[in-house]
Amino acid sequence: MQVNAAAVEIRVAQWGEDAAALTALRRQVFVVEQGVPEELEWDGLDAGAAHFLACADGVVVGCARLLGDGHVGRMAVLSPWRGRGVGSALLREVLSACRARGYGHAFLNAQTAALDFYRRLGFHAVGGEFIDAGIPHFRMERAMENLTQQLNQQHAIAGKLRFVDAAPGLPVAEVTLPQATARIAVNGAQVLEWAPAGQQPVIWVSRAAVYQPGKGVRGGVPVCWPWFGAGADGKPAHGFVRTRLWQVRETGVGPADTVFIRLGLTDDESTRALWNHAFDVELVVSVGAALKMELVTRNTGAEAFTITDGLHTYFRVGDIGRTRVLGLEDTVYLDKVQGTGESRQAGAVQFGGETDRVYIGTTADCIIDDAALGRKIRIAKSGSRSTVVWNPWTEKEKGFADMAAGEYRDMLCVETTNAGPDSVSVAPGGEHRLVAFVGVE
Ligand code: TA6
């Protein structure tokens, strides 16, 4: 492939024949120029990887690598050749290889200074910034054009579940059953919709929500993991999994003609740079006349770790001013609005302003008593010792570009969590299951 006037040729390289040229170029760019320690550069993955070379007049001026899971890396261009389309040409060749290999997505760890370069070729940053080899990075990922088609080939269930694009690069599982409909985004494993037959939608999504890869949708059920709430040291709030593309592991038909989808994520160097533990996390969503969401944490490492976690469920209500939450009477809560430490709930929770409370040591069912819609929503749970109740009200709502004016009246979060002092320790090889069961009465 010719690259503009630079007459640079891009070709697929073979590690066997081209190792000397590849290592010389990468040593020059990463080790000498950027100070990456040698032992980090040679990671033992080269022999099994696909490599790409950019050559000008027979001289190697750039390279790139593609691993078998869609991991793009080792993008390097000699300094005199930068800004001349060599890197873009290399990356386009790598993406062509991803398509040819049928990869559903590609991902990489981009130096923060190079984010725009990768954005121009469809990648978007997810999670928080992390340091790798002393250099600030972001994980970036992109769905390949054939992802939704691939998901349908592997996981569609005729007449019950299919994948559609809610937006480019945003595959969503659509469940259509006699007893209920639902939508679950593969990005973030985020439930976006659940409506039992004959009912108004139970899960709320803002009409100003932004549907783009790498950005959570305002509403639905964001998965908060491996921490709930503010991140330490500038890390993202509510953890780093709710903006990532999850893997669809299984779909199927369950009891009483329900349909389930199982999505998962495992640790990688970018998650370990944010939270240095080996893990497997899964969300299993079962759709029927009730909605069951199960967040499963597995510790696949050799050391115990501690998490806080949550299913941050946004519920649709007829009018927040005519809505009450039952089941939390006489329990202790931490008031994040008043900042007044522990308080005790007197009677039902009612709403007349911004409300942001963590009810600790609470395991009982909650009921959203919605007088305006004339319905009750029951939230039962297991593996959860905290219940978070949140409504942004008018001022906080104004701060959310992805909420329309006045929408605070139509929504209420009753979140099934382990938050604050209710953290959970998971032993090596152990697992923790946080389960929310939602039904309409
Ligand atoms: O669960 C309540 C809360 O922690 C609020 O404090 C507010 O931040 C809300 O979550 C939404 O957080 P997000 O990061 O999704 O905008």
Image: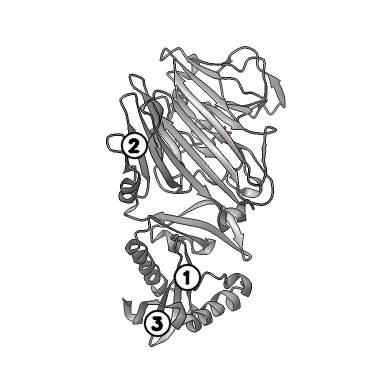
Measured from the top left, where is residue 281 in percent x and y? 54, 44
Measured from the top left, where is residue 15 in percent x and y? 46, 78
Residue identifier under label 3: 55
Q: Nearer the viewer, mark 2 or mark 1?
A: 1
**Of residues 29 and 276, which is closer to you in this image?**
276
Q: Quadrant of residue 417?
A: top right
Q: Nearer the viewer, mark 1 or mark 3?
A: 1
Measured from the top left, where is residue 70 in percent x and y? 43, 60
The CA span between labels 3 and 2 is 46 Å
Instruction: Report the quarter where the N terminus lies.
Output: bottom left
N-terminal label among 1 and 3: 1
Q: Amino acid at mark 1?
A: Gly
Q: Quadrant of residue 231?
A: top right
Q: Secondary structure at mark 3?
A: strand
Q: Amino acid at mark 2?
A: Glu
Outermost left residue: 159
The CA span between labels 2 and 1 is 37 Å
The CA span between labels 1 and 3 is 22 Å
Residue identifier under label 1: 48
Identify the residue at image location x=36%, y=21%. Answer: 200
Residue identifier under label 2: 174
Q: Label 3: few (<14), some or many (≥20) within 10 Å?
A: some
